[in-house]
Image: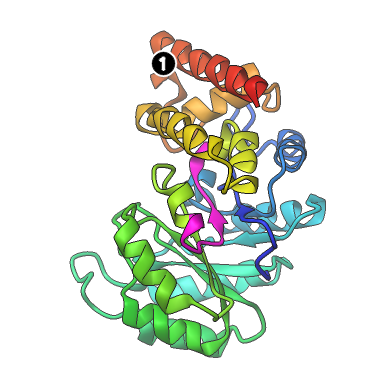
Amino acid sequence: MAVAHQAGLWPVMLTPFTHDGEVDYSSLERLIDWYEKKGVDGLFADCQSSEIFFLSLRERTELASFIKKHAHVPVIASGHVSNAFSDQLEELKAIATTGVDALILITNRLVHAGRQQESIMPRVRQIMREIPDIPLGFYECPYPFKRLITLDELKECAETGRFSFMKDTCCDIATIRQRLAVLSGSGFGLYNANTTTCLESVRAGAAGFSGVMLNFHPELYRWMLDHVSDPKADLIQSFLTVFSEIERQYYPVNAKFYQTEIAKVFSDPYTRSIPAEGLTETFKTEVRHLNAAAEWLWNQL
């Protein structure tokens, strides 16, 4: 989990399903290969993009095990979705047995809905005691509500030496800079999930990017983060910011449509979290136009 010499790309992985709604492991193996050929540095399994709130614990555990077995890059995973903290502990312990390189804690699971101002640290300390032998991280998952980590909580966790990965979803460069100051020198890397602030955050010291657009064109992010001092990087950032508006369209179905029709990785765009039929013909055309623009940009590089 050490930060590489180049800014890291950690896609939030999709879960492919068959037309009957079962996990499609043949497509998943192709997806792992697709990510790796596009230049990613690691894989984030069992996250919101993976539809973890719509997967059983058995499915979440089997997914993490399969991805770790077939990947040639490090794999991290979350997977605790229950409301009861005792149930979350069992979920986390199950995911920890899969061999993943770090166990990622979802911040909104560590407080009660409507009581977001409460500290997450009592539960974090208990997790550290009960699951002692695996690196940890955080994910500010926006579903079912977003709970941003505080600077004091971040500082305490950094000082433990147990934490290595922070998926930041604050989408605010000023806050990111404050967090980077707290994390400086700790080995606890901040990975921005927001495209708009991606380049600026990496120039400020962020360890990399972990956003949903890596399910469309990770090679463009690879080029930008490998050339952060190149004047063209700012232009690439501008393109990527506009491209990322597709996130607000009909995700993750649009990404699964991309992986099915364009990338030829998935066998079906079936989605458990929202109906795949909601991706209209206009939405599909927008994804095709996005791909054409991304391919043109890549050819310029």
Residue 83 seen from this side: no
Residue 207 magenta-highlighted = yes
In the rendered structure, which amino acid carries the disc numbered 1? Phe
Q: How is the image coloured?
A: rainbow
Question: Left of 274 or right of it: where is 130?
Answer: right
Judged from the image, the secondary structure of the residue bearing numbered disc 1 is helix
Q: Residue at 56% of width from left, 56% of height from top? A: 208
- The span picked out in magenta is 202-213
- Choose between 170 and 112: the one closer to the eye: 170
- Choose between 61 and 31: the one closer to the eye: 31
Q: Position of residue 120 (x, y in %)?
A: 34, 78
Q: Residue at 63% of width from left, 18% of height from top? A: 262
Q: Residue at 51% of width from left, 33% of height from top? A: 236
Q: Position of residue 222 (x, y in %)?
A: 64, 42
Q: Position of residue 195 (x, y in %)?
A: 44, 43
Residue 6 magenta-highlighted = no
Q: Is residue 25 above or below residue 245?
A: below
Residue 39 seen from this side: yes
Q: Quadrant of the C terminus?
A: top right
- Choose between 220 and 272: the one closer to the eye: 220
Question: Left of 116 or right of it: where is 141?
Answer: right
Q: Position of residue 171 (x, y in %)?
A: 34, 52
Q: Is residue 127 above or below residue 75?
A: below
For label 1, the residue is 283
Residue 102 lies in quadrant: bottom right
Mark 1 Cα shell of 10 Å, populated few (<14), some (14-19), many (≥20): some
Q: Is residue 64 above or below residue 119?
A: above
Residue lying at the far left of the rendered structure:
114
Q: Quadrant of the N terminus?
A: bottom right
Q: Residue at 62% of width from left, 66% of height from top? A: 95
